[in-house]
Amino acid sequence: MSAVVENHDHHDDHHGPKKGLMRWLKTTNHKDIGTLYLWFAFAAFLLGGAFAMGIRAELFEPGLQLMDPIRYNQLVTMHGLIMIFGGVMPAFVGLANWLIPLQIGAPDMAMPRMNNLSFWLLPVAFGILLSTAFMEGGLPGFGWTFYAPLSTNYPNVAYFVFAIHIMGASSIMGSINVIVTIMNMRAPGMTLMKMPLFVWSWLITAYLLIAVMPVLAGAVTMLLMDAYFGTSFFDAAGGGDPVLFQHVFWFFGHPEVYIMILPAFGITSHIISTFSRKPLFGHSSMVYAMVSIAVLSFVVWAHHMFTVGMPLVAELFFMWATMLIAIPTGVKVFNWCATIFKGSITYETPMLFAIAFVVLFTIGGFSGLMLAITPADFQYHDTYFVVAHFHYVLVPGSVFSIMAAVYYWLPKWTGNMYDEKMGRLHFWLSFIGVNITFFPQHFVGLAGMPRRYADYALQFAEWNAVSSVGAFLFGLSQLLFLYIVVKTVFAGKKATPQVWDGADGLEWTVDSPAPYHTFDVPPKVK
Amino acid sequence: MNTETTSHQKYYVPESSSIPIVFAIAMLFFGVGAADAVMGKGTTLLFIGIATVIGTLAYWWSVVIRESHAGLDTPQLNTSYVYGMAWFIFSEVMFFAAFFGALFYIRTFSISWLGGEGDKGLAGELLWPDFEATWPPMITPEESLMGDQAVTKGPDESMYLQGIGSLGTWLPLYNTVVLLSSSGTVHFAHMALKDNNRKRFNLWLGVTVLLAFIFVILQALEYYEAYAHLGLTISSGVYGTTFFMLTGFHGMHVLIGGIFLATQLTRSAGYNHFTDKEHFGFEAASWYWHFVDVVWVCLFLFVYIL
């Protein structure tokens, strides 16, 4: 098997990409596919953001101004689905595609054609999901969590189900690709504990995906059967239980939450270490912390349903298990602080986003701890406090880390430096906008404002107006982000291979922009 | 097969390929077609989808086989396929775990609470005072309240063994014997291949494929019995639901596994593929087959016996 066989498709390893549309449709190159994923995520981010603007416009003042409650529910649902399955997850997969082969010294992902399929299934799935907008009955409006029996009685739910199936297939193939690439394609000498943390975070994320996406497939299948084939999974009249839906869904849903934050941990670790010009404090404890978080994520799902009527033992078990997660998460936050401590810090845009990530994600973590306390959750459940909590971990958490990653690696991808002044402006606008949007939601939530309503009581008016103003500011500043990225793709100061003087890792040993093919011969890692 | 020994060989990265995008378009037809069919808007798109999905997959795999014969598959690439298949099977395990989890939840919690027992039984006691918590529930909660007016009625008979006398006509037992022996025969086939004995390999693999299709036929017979004589349908309350969903998905996987094995038989008997060292296509099929077998053992225990 050692003979090198000439492949008719593969005349020359170093010629550039094909031209035109066919390049993107037929590509097997991890960098091309990473780019596709990232642009897809950006488009979804803007579309989901537009839905969010609609929500905040309606909530700007009490009463119904812009839409009827059904339309409002559709906006809330599509905002959630698009941001999660179209925005955050594909953005992280795009980063994984670009960075994992570069960071472990592999020529490409392990299964390049399947990699292309994983991407192109996403537009297919979202096309099916959004096509319901043009049907009688319209878009799904049952919330991204599609609780039964609301969803089992909803029009067009079959399109939603098959769209989710196709997204799930895409995620499962993507995660198999990531696992196989990391386990099988590392450069000689790169032991597991020498692996960069972004790669580690994605290895763990991929295991989570492969364990829970099939469970989501099971949940939507049960939903489909109940809705169209007369089964009784979620119907008490036939001996089932609507609460069963919530158990199956959240068994997927909670690990899903960590799928959307673990890669952010990896990114933050790289950036904080680079701009503090110090090696990361506690590299191996970071790994163990992420593994612990991943393992614990399988035994905490019912904290999303404390008020549904579970036996007391279950309420207590899920409360304690949830609180345990604070320990490994605390390890990570303290490690980041220790890395910054006595470092030679500079505040380029990625570092600003990374520091904001640590601070604001920790706020989201603390409100999470409050929600984990079962008796307290009886007060907070389904209020805006919950909305504030998960937006703090998702927007200045996951989304900020993605923006940090884009600024950090954009010079490596494009060969051009972004405009630092504009980048900082984008950061400060986003930082202020996000806090004005979501911090007041803690107040109205604690005061009892319920989520998922198009209207609200008068006493919540002031803070909702503030929140809406913040949301418009945050939303508009993302157009600036779009402008900066596009500008950097086409022009800018040429980047050196090293880009950042404190950066460490294999991706900084190749040219900027990274050549179309890298590491055809694996580098030696000492 | 670690990277040290293979680092001098190049990992095969196909330069570009139109297979995946064609497959994605096929999935578009399949997804829209399936939803259309479920909602009663016609089945044309679904059949186009199924045909194009199967066609593209078959072509894709034939390309992979040709690449392998052209010597493009370094040991490292083979390792990728081995890991990939293993994790694919794990994802299938988790899919079944969701349905087994639902079964356990319903049997342990839903049914007893609906019957007024346990921690959360009060609501059940008030809503369905006459519903009795038994497994399988032959009378659904709705039926206990409304009698013949109920929409969701229980089955006349369950698939559990109705007394030791009927053991000889109890289909699940035959199915178990058939499937467990097929796991043995596929192993014998593997042994024969490792001994480089192609005739014996083809024979044992042929027996396995035969057993696979016998199983599918028996399962179809069992479904016919259920619908025609036992009043047991997919809408016979939660027992019918869990019974048909679990055995149905398992049956589908047996069918897929059977086709998977039959393909390997065709490759060996018709085209002399596989050597005593290089036969991952067959190994992957046999792993899948053992997985299907293990699922059946769980099914037999928790759906037919306990």
Image (cartoon, rainbow, N blue to C red):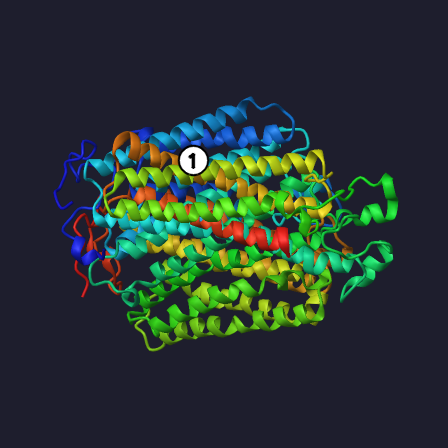
Who's the residue at 81% across and 58% down the image? Answer: B124
Residue A240 in the image: x percent, y percent?
Answer: 72, 51
Which residue, given by chain and number where applicable, does mark 1 sit on? B259
Where on the picture, by quarter, is residue B225?
top right
Where on the picture, by quarter, is residue A504?
bottom left
The front one of B247 and B306 is B306
Residue A368 in the image: x percent, y percent?
Answer: 58, 67
Residue A76 seen in the current view: no
Badge 1: few (under 14), some or many (20 or more) residues near its Cα, within 10 Å?
Answer: some
Residue A375 in the image: x percent, y percent?
Answer: 70, 71
Q: In this view, does A231 lie above or below A429?
A: above
Residue B177 seen in the current view: yes
Q: In this view, does A23 lie to the left or right of A260?
A: left
Quadrant location of the C terminus of chain A in the rendered image: bottom left
| Dot 1 amino acid type | Ile
**Chain of the residue that carries numbered disc 1 in the rendered image:** B
Residue A447 in the image: x percent, y percent?
Answer: 72, 64
